[in-house]
Amino acid sequence: MMTPEEHFNVWAPEDSPWSPWAKPVAFTQLDETSACGPGGEWRDVDLWWAPAADGSTALIIDLSGSVSVETGIALAERGFRPIPLFNNVAGKAAIVDMLPVLDRIHHGTHHLSRLALPPHAPPCFLLDEDRTVGTRDIEHQVGTFDNRWIVLPQDLPSGRFLRARGIRDVWWASRLSEPADDLAHVLRGWQDERIGIWHFDPTADRPVHAIAVERPRRFRLMWYRALAAAGLRRNSAGGFGSVIPQDAGAGGFG
């Protein structure tokens, strides 16, 4: 059995320049006897859309959490380095169900460990499309475990860093037609650094197409700080996730 640190080192090896952005939070919930779920058969992912892993293109997989992990492993078999950005923890009556994500990370480690990706493998960053809204129909009430989260600019490399590593285009995989505000901040910054932003929906039969990311409605960094402090709940282990206390009030993310 593997320890949490051993799991994390498979996903974030020291020789990859993209490893500093991998989030360890979810991995802390994998223990030596980790069996978050039955595992089952690994889902085959249709990568009809995938570009060549020639080092000029990075990917953002912004699908449901477990599907993002499965897609990341499939892309690893094509030569991309999956970088998990999940920045929350699981909990009882959680708004974002993390157990399927932990299960796929746990079982995906073994797939990833046998691939021996080279250090220069281009990145595919893994997000959860439900990170800000949740996956369960649970009222935000006292006793609910609020583990919604956002991606911050520092959670991803700068456009300058991408260009220095030869990345000229970023493909964003999502069922949405426009990125959520948190991701839009990141994509807009890359766009300003002359990184091409492309969008595609893996579930739809439509071609990959270039998009112009508009300046988010709340563009200033202060919005992030206020939101993270007031609308989301930090966890002592790092990342997001905490039980809504008795005096929480309405609060929430919106």
Image (cartoon, grey):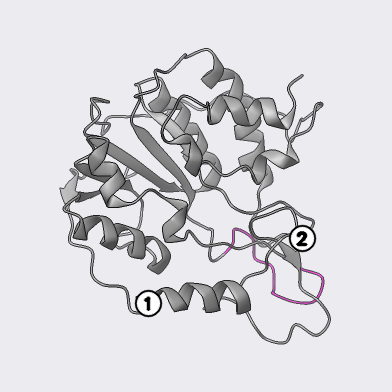
Which residue is pictured at 75% across the width and 77% down the height? 141
Which residue is pictured at 19% across the width and 41% down the height? 168
Determine which of the numbered discs, if any, sits on residue 54 in the image: none
Q: Amino acid type of disc 1? A: Arg
Q: Position of residue 252 (x, y in %)?
A: 61, 78
Image side of residue 146 versus residue 191, left or right? right
Q: Amino acid type of disc 2? A: Ala
* Residue 4 versus residue 186 in the image, above or below: above
Determine which of the numbered discs, if any, sits on residue 220 in the image: 1
Image side of residue 50 versus residue 222, left or right? left
* Residue 172 versus residue 131 in the image, above or below: above
Image side of residue 33 versus residue 197, left or right? right
Choose the circle earlier in sequence order: 1 or 2. 2
Whether residues under marks 1 and 2 lie with C-beta atoms below 8 angstroms apart, the answer is no
Along the viewing direction, whichever of 139 and 159 lies nearer the viewer: 159
Q: Is residue 142 magenta?
A: yes
Q: Position of residue 147 (x, y in %)?
A: 66, 61
**For the magenta stretch, what is the residue range?**
134-145
